[in-house]
Image (cartoon, rainbow, N blue to C red):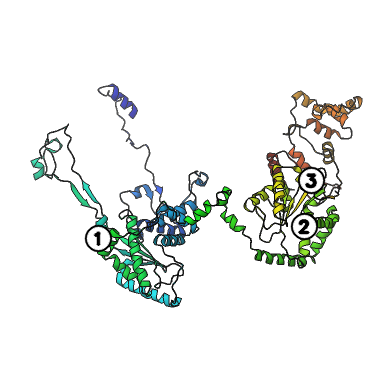
Amino acid sequence: MDNYSKQLAQDIFLREPADARIRKQKEQPQDDDPHPTLKVEMQTIRLHPDSQKFVLETLRYIHGPDFKLKSASLYKDKSSNLRNRFWMERGNLVVQGGFDYSLNTKPDMKSSEARLREFALAKLERYNFHKAHCAEALEMAAENLDLALEILFSKYYKINLSDKPENIPSSSELLEMINDEKAVLESIYDSQFKVQDCNVWRVKLKLDYLTKMYAKKIVIPKKKEDSNFKTKKKEICKLYLSGPCRFGAKCKFLHESKIESTAPCIEEDKEQITFELEIRFPKGSVYPYEPPLLFFLLETRNNLIPGRTCLLITSKLLEEAQNLAQDGIPSIYSIVELLNNEDEIKNCIQFSTKEFPSITEPLFPQLIESLDSNDHKPTHYNKRDSQDRKNIINFDEMLKENRDLAKRWKEKRTNNRYNKMMSVRENLPAWQKRADILNAMKKSQVIVISGETGCGKSTQVPQYILDDWLRNFSNDPKHVEIVCTQPRRISAIGVAERIRLESKVSSKTRLVFCTTGILLRRLEYDPQLSSVTHVIVDEVHERSEESDFLLLILRDLIKVRKDLRVILMSATLNADLFSDYFDNVPVLEIPGRTFPVEQVFLEEIMDITNYILEENGPYARKLKKDKKADLEIEIETSDVRSEASEPPKISIRDENLTLSQTLARYPKCNKLTCKNMYLMDVEKINLELVKHVLTYIVEGDHDWPKEGAILIFLPGIGEIMSLHDQLAESHTFSPK
């Protein structure tokens, strides 16, 4: 009988029925714990030295600067029974599995920059400054903690740190005086004086008079009796008072000592409270001829003394340091002794009328006023300070760079590669109109250039302006900066690899290709395009909202900027429309150049490349089983049928033709091509055929050019990525 059956028997019968067997089997020992105790391997995880340093700094910030790690032998197993659960000091760590928790990023998880900022704010608040002021100073100091602390010190105590006294000793003499004072302080205060680094000193102090002023008393009130439930108190057992009671728990008397509290218990908070005086010597300090940065704060508890009290004490110490600095006397010892003067400090706390910046007032009101005065400007002005600073024009530096560019251009004219490139440019139709374009720009502020596709107006007209400026720079060292806009990003990429929000412009750039939106964005923070001399609007005939808006702005801008030149490049059809919009400006026409184009149709390319479309492939249309069986027979006899029948009407689409009708429509193609045309699913894009044709163009035996680029048009990004993946896996097109 197993344990479960025995339990059922005990529940049903008052007496357990006897076992009918003659010999009883030995009872198996019951295992109360279904999960046996198993040992796992105890491992030691070692931290990187940088991580150890960071953890130690954090522990010192929490427990105080004197915190030190104890020896490993002092950390004992405190009733955790580790040896019964772990293998100690055995083997190396074996990783049996893992999980990448970096993928499970929570939306509320703070970035490392945010955590560092919070840590910096907490350190600044420790000096009893308001949190809002700490954030303002930290932002003004560009997240530099030391600089933010100097800003707060100067604002709260109204001290200008940039003012230096006259007739001070040399830096070596000042350093010698500081080292002498440090040696004296170490001998006087011993372990109370600590040097964190050469610029930060700390003195620990126990000021009992301050502790008594603000220490809290813990009062334990007497427990009140409930009048509604009065119970008779038990008497104390006399046997229990004299020794152990023989009745034990069954005794009807109370087993307690005869101690009764009649008054509330008052306990003083006896926690050891330590104060700290922090002395900082900022960069460029001439101490002792100027006071150092002083901060009086609590080392152990921040909430014992109000923050204003610490600020008042610091202000009192700073006055003493300023008085001594007038005579060049070291002041640290005098300041520490002043802290030990109970009467002076208490009078300062109780009767001082010194005011500090209010939490409701900003530290930099003049900055807020300047921002408020610009409320009429677009809101993004407040967010683009760095962009505004970046666009401040230094004309002297610009003139120097222009000279360097002109010098480099003249040196490049002797280069063979440059001359070869110039010979290619001279073959373009736009080259014949180069002189006319430059002369028209000298006479008119706005011109319209009309040219067909392939004439070279988009790439050559901006370069003609740039070359003419560099050629005549020695005679007329003026500044030239050209901005050429394109209606689409793909156009801008094609001419200059310049797209929206991806800047490839330096201080030496004099010709910029960008989208129309980029120029409109630039007009927001530079309404007059102060450094731009030429604006070229390409493909203006497309009439987008952005281009029309840009033309509206440019028509008003040329009335203010008489030196600005605007070139509109349009198709032949509506060039006069833009000429009339700008008051009948001159129109220049550039003849186009046609390129030979050979058309190869689908059935022809399949016939040339011997492409085979599988009947059950993904790009073949579905056929019924009976049609698949009769397909080969129909192919063999289809030529006879096609000769006997007339070609199908042109209005009938290819996908609606029978195999014999397909042969009749394409009599010059072989049977395999006609079969492919018949089986092809016209609703799908045959990427396999595209790959087959590309392979033939690259490796096939033909007279087509094998230099240049191949342009493929596909309807969407999905098809583009699928074809890209197939080509990347092929032996011919793989980049590996």
Q: Which mark is residue 209?
A: 1
Q: In this rendering, would 241 be left or right of 428? A: left
Report the front residue among 185 and 728.
Answer: 185
The amino acid on which the numbered mark 2 sits, given as a three-letter code, is Gln
Q: Is residue 628 above or below residue 200?
A: above
Task: Compare marks 2 and 3 and give the one earlier in the sequence.
Answer: 2
> Residue 37 in the image: x percent, y percent?
37, 42
> Residue 88 in the image: x percent, y percent?
38, 52
Task: Compare marks 1 and 2 and give the one earlier in the sequence.
Answer: 1
Report the front residue among 312 and 35.
Answer: 312
Q: Quadrant of the N terminus?
A: top left
At horizontal 33% and vertical 26% (from top left) the residue drawn is 5
The amino acid on which the numbered mark 1 sits, given as a three-letter code, is Tyr
Q: Could you give the CA–CA distance between mark 2 and mark 3, rounded to whole angstroms?
A: 27 Å
Q: Could you give the CA–CA distance between mark 1 and mark 2, rounded to whole angstroms?
A: 82 Å
| In front: label 1 or label 3 | 3
